[in-house]
Image (cartoon, rainbow, N blue to C red):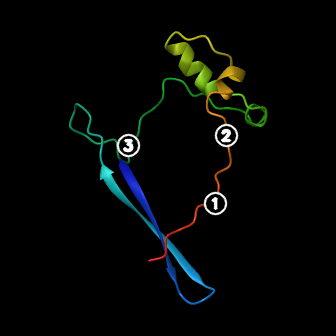
Amino acid sequence: MEGRTYVHAVKLDATNVAQYGVEVSTADLIMNDGKSLENVGVIPDETILPSPTDIAQGRDPVLARAAELVGVKMTAEEAGKVFPFTWPKERVLEID
């Protein structure tokens, strides 16, 4: 399934705002057999998870393995620099 999240805020009074959101399904992946993956999922061929140390040191062994599968040599350290994590800035919500 694919969905889109809509976040809103309603001004209650001069100092209070109520925030709410809704996620609306916009697509469903149907496989060749005519079945959806919704509530079924898939089992990966390999399970690769970064350790807490990998995360703390900016390594990405998962991306490094994915790159290796398509013929690209990349260390976990190099992979960790491809999509560096940055904390999101607070976004200002629209007031309905």
Residue at mark 1: 90
Three-letter residue code for mark 3 = Val
Using the rendered view, name the quadrant where residue 34 is placed. Answer: top left
In the rendered view, would you say 80 is above or below 72? Answer: below
Residue tagged by mark 3?
A: 40
Q: Secondary structure at mark 3?
A: loop
The relative height of residue 27 versus residue 50 in the rendered view (above or below) is below
Q: Quick check: marks 2 and 3 in contact, CB under 8 Å?
A: no
Residue 72 position, x and y percent, is 55, 11
| Disc 2 secondary structure class | loop
Is mark 3 in CB contact (under 8 Å) with mark 1? no
Q: Nearer the viewer, residue 56 or 41?
A: 56
Task: Look at the picture and state if 7 lies above or below 16.
Answer: above
User: What whole-number distance in Å separates the C-alpha atoms at marks 3 and 1?
Assistant: 35 Å
> Which residue is at a point 33% across and 55% down the rendered structure image?
25
In the picture, measured across the screen, residue 80 lies left or right of residue 96, that is: right
